[in-house]
């Protein structure tokens, strides 16, 4: 068996059974990862080998710390790693070497996981396309000429290409779910504040979240639990029977391309055949909530990075620079008013959807666009980026947790959105949904 292509939980069970050696598996990953400079920004080989050897010893002694003890993960290059550069995909932070690990990496290390290295990403995580001419653009799993999805681009490709058992990314407006969707993987956007972001290079602190990209829902559940330092939720006997699912009509389908709609409807049909009750309607608070995006995201992102950006704007890809600067002239009064209004929309949304187990949208309205055209046509870049992020951002704006599942049509995902802090319930629902799509 080619263990590099196995899921994280499957590898964990194999380690426990003595069928897989963490040291040999880590060496296999490092060997292929060393030749993948367009996916890994930098590897942490000595750390990985030391952690794998420690996991090997625990396995021999019967003292494994959990399912993912000895399983090798990749980390997006915005998670601080002690003594190893963490540059968040931008030349603005070249040579930035933190003194300690991000808290979430510390937690994962305590759980026994192996840190392989840092994956490429969009500059400062501010694009859903995954294109980064300043460092590297990972190749989409279906066609290297197409965008990989971002901003956790290298994270997704490290899993899709068998360069890690699972990956840790971040999601501020869709940065876990879009690359997961475009590379036929599972991506979990966690509730804001659920997983610590201490030691994570920020974009918008009021929206930044941490989450896994994996091969399947079971892996997402185990990695999510690892990041929180607890046992994984019980996914056994998960079922869609009598689950109430709402297809969110209106905005999520405006301008949506044919293939993503086909994939979405294929999945919805499978859910219905598995016993789910499907309803379809729009929700009036979604559009005005989404209209606040420009008031809330870009001003905070620019405020976070304006000094570094304006000190050396030539170090940035022009399209990303322009996106940051779009928040430059925002009024504090508009920002404060926007948050006040958003609180009302969030409350209205939760009340309107309380009777449903999840709300469904196509993860991305578009397919991965051509990288060369994105780089040569600034207007096209901006148009595709806005569309790519539109549906995923609903979950961020409304403060939800969300799960992307592949639909069986390449690069077309379906997102299940659930109320904040209900990830365990969402993962059970996702396990049943995944089974219906098999």
Image: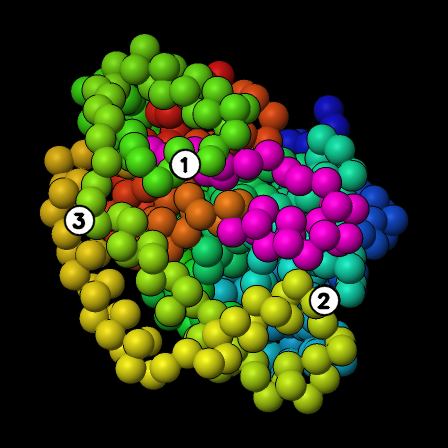
Question: Which is more N-terminal, label 3 or label 2?
Answer: 2
Mark 2 or mark 3: which is in front? 2
Q: Secondary structure at mark 3?
A: helix
Question: What residue sits right under mark 1 in the picture?
Answer: 254
**Residue 359 in picture, x, y percent from top left:** 28, 36
Mark 2 or mark 1: which is in front? 1
- Which residue is painted at 28% across and 70% down in the image? 338
Q: Nearer the viewer, residue 131 or 104?
A: 131
Q: Nearer the viewer, residue 72 or 58?
A: 72
* Vertical comparison of 75 with 250: above or below: below
Q: Which mark is residue 350?
A: 3
How many angstroms separate mark 2 from mark 3 (CA)?
38 Å
Report the span colored magenta. Answer: 360-386
Mark 3 or mark 1: which is in front? 1
Q: Residues within 10 Å of mark 2 (few under 14, many from 20)?
A: some
Question: What residue sits right under mark 2 in the picture?
Answer: 317
**Residue 151 in picture, x, y percent from top left:** 59, 55
How many angstroms separate mark 3 from mark 1 (CA)?
23 Å
């Amino acid at each position: 068996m080619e263990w590099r292509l196995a899921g994280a939980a499957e590898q964990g069970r194999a380690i426990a059974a003595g069928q897989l050696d963490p040291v040999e598996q880590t060496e296999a990953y490092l060997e292929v990862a060393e030749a993948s400079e367009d996916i890994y920004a930098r590897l942490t080989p000595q750390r990985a080998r030391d952690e794998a050897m420690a996991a090997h010893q625990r396995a021999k002694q019967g003292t494994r710390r959990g399912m993912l003890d000895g399983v090798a993960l990749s980390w997006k290059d915005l998670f601080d790693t002690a003594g190893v550069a963490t540059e968040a995909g931008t030349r603005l932070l070249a040579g930035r070497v933190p003194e300690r690990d991000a808290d979430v990496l510390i937690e994962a290390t305590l759980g026994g996981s192996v840190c392989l290295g840092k994956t490429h990403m969009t500059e400062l995580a501010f694009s859903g396309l995954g294109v980064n001419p300043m460092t590297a653009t990972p190749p989409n799993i279906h066609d290297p000429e197409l965008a990989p999805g971002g901003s956790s681009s290298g994270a997704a490709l490290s899993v899709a290409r068998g360069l890690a058992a699972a990956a840790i990314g971040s999601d501020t407006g869709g940065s876990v779910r879009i690359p997961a969707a475009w590379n036929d993987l599972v991506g979990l956007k966690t509730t804001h504040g659920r997983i610590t972001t201490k030691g994570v290079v920020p974009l918008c602190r009021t929206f930044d979240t941490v989450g896994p990209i994996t091969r399947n829902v079971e892996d997402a559940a185990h990695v999510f639990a690892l990041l929180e330092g607890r046992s994984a939720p019980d996914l056994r006997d998960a079922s869609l029977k009598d689950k109430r699912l709402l297809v969110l009509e209106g905005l999520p389908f405006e301008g949506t391309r044919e293939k993503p709609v086909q994939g979405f409807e294929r999945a919805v049909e499978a859910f219905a055949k598995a016993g789910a009750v499907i309803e379809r309607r729009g929700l009036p608070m979604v559009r005005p909530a989404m209209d606040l995006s420009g008031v809330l995201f870009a001003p905070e992102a620019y405020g976070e990075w304006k000094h570094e950006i304006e000190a050396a704007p030539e170090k940035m890809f022009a399209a990303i620079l322009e996106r940051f600067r779009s928040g430059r002239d925002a009024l504090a009064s508009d920002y404060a008013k926007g948050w006040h209004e958003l609180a009302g929309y969030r409350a209205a949304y939760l009340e309107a959807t309380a009777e449903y187990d999840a709300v469904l949208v196509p993860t991305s309205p578009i397919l991965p666009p051509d990288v060369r055209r994105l780089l040569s046509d600034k207007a096209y870049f901006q148009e595709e980026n806005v569309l790519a992020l539109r549906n995923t951002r609903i979950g961020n704006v409304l403060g939800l947790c969300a799960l992307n599942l592949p639909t069986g049509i390449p690069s077309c995902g379906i997102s299940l959105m659930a109320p904040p802090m209900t990830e365990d319930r969402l993962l059970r629902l996702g396990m049943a949904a995944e089974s219906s799509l098999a």
